[in-house]
Image (cartoon, grey):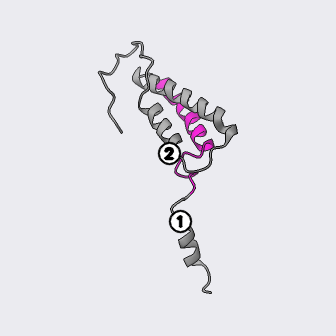
Amino acid sequence: MPKQKGPAPRRGAKVANRKRRGELALERALKARTAPRDPTGAALEVLALNLAHVLDAAVAADDRYAVAQLTPRMIDLLERLRLTPNTQPMTDGLGDLLNSLSGPPV
């Protein structure tokens, strides 16, 4: 993961309104998706980006309680958006090849 630019904010200090690691990574993942974009999922994408921003701010402020509360919600949103390893479709054809090889001989 890329390092944050600039010094880390002190505990309790105001966090600048800028994109950080989690939000940037989520933006990259949303852009790189190979699955067709569902128009009804646009609201979930916006919610996930907002939550990523808040989660990044909580991490930067060392607010461990907020991080613990937000992380399960973020994981749920990532699963709904099919951005977790368990929910991403295989697109390289390897799965189809392995399924065809494991079937009965023709």
Dominant secondary structure, magenta: helix
Q: Callout 2 environment at 10 Å: few (<14), some (14 to 19), or many (20+)?
A: few
| Left or right: 103 as drawn, with respect to 5 | right
Q: Residue at position x 40%, y 23% from top?
A: 60
In which quadrant will I find the N terminus? top left
Asked which quadrant contains residue 100, the reply is bottom right
Residue 99 shown left or right of residue 9 in the figure: right
Residue 93, position in %: x, y?
A: 53, 65
Residue 71 vertical placement versus 57 (above, below): below
What amino acid type should be assigned to the residue bearing mark 2?
Ala
Q: Which numbered marker is on residue 57?
A: none
Vertical side of 18 occupied by 49: above or below: below
Q: Which mark is residue 93?
A: 1
Identify the mark nearer the N-term, 2 or 1.
2
Q: Quadrant of the C terminus?
A: bottom right
- Residue 32's mark? 2
Give the residue drawn at x 45%, y 33%: 24
Count of numbered badges drawn on the protein? 2
Q: Which stretch did the figure color magenta?
A: 64-89
Closest to the observer, 17 or 75: 17
Q: What residue sits 50% from the left and 45% below the top?
A: 32
12 in relation to 52, above or below: above
- Secondary structure, mark 1, is loop
Inter-mark Cα distance, 2 to 1 = 18 Å
Residue for point 51% across, 30% down: 52
Residue 4 in picture, x, y percent from top left = 34, 29
Name the kind of residue labelled 1 in the image. Gly
Residue 47, position as x, y percentages in the image: 60, 29
